[in-house]
Image: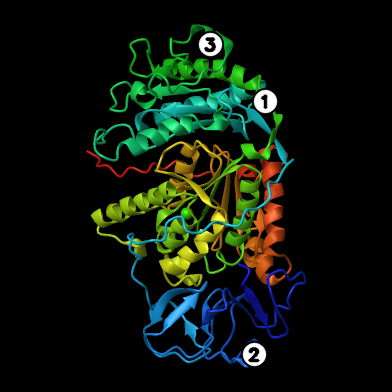
Amino acid sequence: MAHTVIDSGETHRASAAQTAIDPAVPLTIRMHPLDNVAIVANDGGLAAGAVLAGGLLLRDRVPQGHKVALEALPVGAAVLRYGVVIGHALQDMAAGSWVHERVLQMPTAQALAGLPMATVKPRPQSALEGYTFEGFRNRDGSVGTRNILAITQTVQCVAGVTEFAVQRIKTELLPRYPNVDDVVALEHGYGCGVAIDAPGAEIPIRTLRNISLNPNFGGEIMVVSLGCEKLQPERLLPPGSIPLVDQRQLDEGDAGGRGTLDVVRLQDDAHVGFMSMVEAIVRQAETHLQRLNARRRETVPASELVVGVQCGGSDAFSGVTANPAVGFCSDLLVRAGASVMFSETTEVRDGIAQLTSRAASLDVAEALVREMAWYDAYLQRGSADRSANTTPGNKAGGLSNIVEKAMGSIVKSGSMAITGVLAPGQKLQQKGLTYAATPASDFICGTLQLAAGMNLHVFTTGRGTPYGLAAVPVIKVATRSDLARRWHDLMDINAGRIADGSASIEDVGWELFWLMLDVASGRKKTWAEHWKLHNALVLFNPAPVT
Ligand code: CA
């Protein structure tokens, strides 16, 4: 990002500019000295005839976020953004022309053989000491940022009954337990009507299991089961996976020193009528609420943060403002000893060489290749390729294809060495920067990062999405000031100030870091929490349904 140049009619300067630029002055952003295109930064775009810095005359109207040719691009010419070939010209274009997705041929995907493996040793950075937040320490050592009772479900069949019970728990019980933040039903579409032993079925099953163990749920596990479903409670949460939650369980636990599974089974003979089921769930919930309510926040080091980053509704500014700021913050988190996960396989696939070279070891690099190859095969099975990722909104926002989108997406990961790789649904076991392989779908990615043990989520958006999760606070970062102004009560941070010239990447990165500590501590709520906006859990199930 050090190469970023913001060109206005009056100034040439790096992104660290501190004063706002006159909106009437044509403003373009070039990401790398090799680039032969720049993007238009002005709200509303620029009209044909506008004169850019250096005297270049725009030949076409160019919308905000879209690319302008900085030199003549003959047919076949490589078009570079981020110093990377994002496509080849399909027609002759004069300097000053609008370069959009219909005049660009997307490059073929990089082969997974012959990649640079663990070749780059990122410059060591000093440790950040002394940063803390107020969190809920769990018996297994993990730390919650919220204190939530989660009700796990084995199957979709029980969702309606569980939701009815949850409403009663919230109105009748929750007011008596003021240290508990919320009650959340872990509703999902899995559990029956699925090929439960097929290859790939372990992904949704371990995802559900590991979500139940998310640090924000305090190790309190209760399950609502129907009775006849394929995914039986003991398969979802086998003995040995249940954490012990109090001394009584420590005394009574099995020989392995683990807790027992607390299940309400709706088909049990004991239940006569709907209210009997509801009352059983409410009664069980109260024992968990009592224990959760006894917990208090305590001061813990920032190294206990487990942050998942992703983007959604991306535009051409994502890779200029919000994602670089998140990347700078990712570096701060890693320096503070925390865990950071980045994901979204189809959005890093075209930058795989950047990732394998940054891997801390050959093992990590090979694990990255393994996840990419698995996903290539998964897409191939569905007769799709990576070009299926980009949306109409991405293209309207100036992203011509997945290569350009990927270059902007990867910068969320910052610059540190990649020290871990997770397959979908696996639980994170280490600090530092990890690639958690997930689809790019916002809901599926968020669900899988929850399973990995995320206790704080950062989400960047350019087109805008009101995305939220019930289990974990989601900090949303806007890529453009126009979006931040219009969605002033949905966006938590405005990274558009970087393009406006009123803040640097470092400024916004630090602002995000401080906001994370405040949100993690419960001192501040995100807008999604304020409005109680949250999306569904969506399981990644690559296996067949029956
Ligand atoms: Ca996404």
Q: Is mark 1 on a helix, strand or loop?
A: loop
Q: Which residue lies furthest to the right in this view?
A: 19
Q: Which of 515 and 275 is in front in this view?
A: 515
Q: Confirm or reject: label 3 Cβ below 8 Å from ligand 1.
A: no
> Disc 3 versus disc 2: distance between alpha carbons?
73 Å
Expressed as whole percent of the image width and height from the top left, the position of residue 502 reads 74, 68
Q: Indicate the secondary structure of the residue bearing disc 2.
A: helix
Above or below, comparing residue 153 to residue 478 in the picture: above
- The x and y percentages for residue 479 are 60, 63
Label 3 or label 2, whichever comes before in sequence order: 2
Say if residue 155 shows up in the picture: yes
Q: Mark 1 points at which residue?
A: 179
CB within 8 Å, label 3 to label 2: no
* Residue at image coords 46%, 69%: 404
Is 535 in front, or is 414?
Answer: 414
Residue at the spot of label 3: 250
Q: Which amino acid type is shown beneath numbered disc 2?
A: Gly
Q: Quadrant of the N terminus?
A: bottom right
> Where's residue 297, x and y in %?
69, 28
- Rendered view: 58 above or below 350: below
Mark 3 burial class by Cα count in 10 Å: few <14, some 14-19, many 20+? some
The residue labelled by disc 2 is 54
